[in-house]
Every structure is written in C-alpha cells, then in structure tokens.
Amino acid sequence: MNIEHLTLVFRVNDDLRAIVKHAQACTQHLPTYDQLFDGRYRKDGRTIAIEDCLAKKEPFPKSEDVDVEKIPPALHFVKDRGCYLMSSGSPRDIVKDTTSRVVYADGFSPDGEWIGGDDFVQALDLAFFAKNIEAGATAFHIRVTEEAISMSAMFPRRQPMPPAPMPAAPMPAAPKKPARGK
C-alpha cells in the first residue's frame, strides 16, 4: 500500500490515555529526525540544511546536539513496522523489555497491512489529543498525503432530543348557539 492518500483510525483506549498522560508528565522529550536539524531545539541554535549534510558540508546531527528540554511535548506518529502513536516523553514509557507503549492504527499493526515508502516519525500536537479525549472523543483520524498530515477527532453520535411536550393549551370555548326562536 502506498501512502499517497491514507486515513488511519486510532481508537481511544486505556493505552492511548496512558500515552497522553506520560507525554504530559515528562519534562524532557525525545526529538524527531526533523527536530534534530531545527535551530529552535539545537544546543548551538543553528538550523542545519539536510542538503548540506548530504553534500558532506555538515555532519548529520545527533540527538546529543539537541536540548531535550526545548522539545515540546507531543505524540509521535510513527510509520515503520506498522503505524502507531507513542509518547515523546523521556524516559520512554517502557511496557516490556525495551518496548515502548504504542497504539496501532486499526489494521496497521506489524501483522497488519503493509505500507510502502520511507519510515518516519512526526510530532503531533499533544494538546489536541488531550483536549479531545477529555471531551469524550472515541477515535482520531489521521489523514496522510504526500504533502500533509491532518487530524480530526471522532465523537459518539448524539441521540436527537425528543421533541419537548407542548404545554396543554386551554381549548377555546365553543361558540354559544343562538337561542331558538329569537
């Protein structure tokens, strides 16, 4: 499967709630690959162009080049062996041996559908997830195209409210019949 255009569904469950809480609680966060190049997060304040690294004008940045306290809290959207969300928090949220807690998109676990293309990690706005989970979201849709990643929250369908009962109005009095013979 190619990811030219794909919508992934992530269900809100106990693991996703735990991932959000972990990212909120951590004071340090792990950088994505893109954040390694970004001067806002680098200790030296310099933005590095990947083209300069490819041309060997600059060394490829390392995680040690980043001030992890400057990395904003996020959920990491990862595509490698499956598509999943995980906390950006450091230390990592380990659930077994060296495995971090993750939530896979429906049908996209390591045993699920294969998505071609390069692997990636993208930082997603933690507040978006926290706010919508608090408001009762049941799932998140992440739409991936070649140009952008967009997110939306899904909520349970609300039952339409039954019509309010109409207050009983007094029946108008029947017109009086004219008296006979008059």
Image: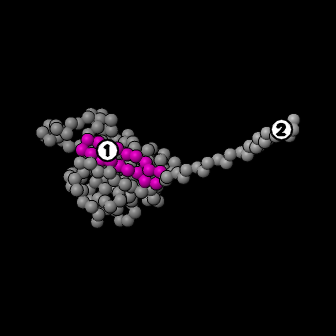
Per the model, the C-alpha gap separating discs 2 and 1 is 80 Å
The quadrant holding residue 145 is: top left
Q: Amino acid at mark 1?
A: Ile
- Residue 98, given in percent of the width and then of the height, sits at 34, 62
Residue shown at 49%/53% (left/top)? 156
x%, y% of residue 40? 33, 35
The majority secondary structure of the magenta stretch comes to strand
Q: 58 left or right of 96?
A: left
Q: Residue 20 at what x, y percent from top left?
A: 44, 51
Q: For the residue carrying disc 1, how many other residues have a C-alpha within 10 Å: few (<14), some (14-19), or many (20+)?
A: some
For numbered disc 2, what is the local secondary structure?
loop
Quadrant for the N terminus in the image: bottom left
Which stretch did the figure color magenta? 138-155
28 vs 161, nearest the viewer:
161
Q: Which of the 4 image quarters holds residue 150? A: top left
Q: Which residue is mark 1?
A: 149
Visible residue check, residue 74? no
Q: Tell me which residue sits at (47%, 47%) in the image.
A: 132
Q: Earlier in the sequence, mark 2 or mark 1?
A: 1
Q: Quadrant of residue 179?
A: top right
Front label number (2 vs 1): 2
What residue type is disc 2 on?
Pro
Q: Mark 2 highlights which residue?
A: 178
Numbered disc 1: secondary structure: strand
- The image quadrant where one finds the C terminus is top right
Q: Mark 2 near mark 1, Cβ–Cβ under 8 Å?
A: no
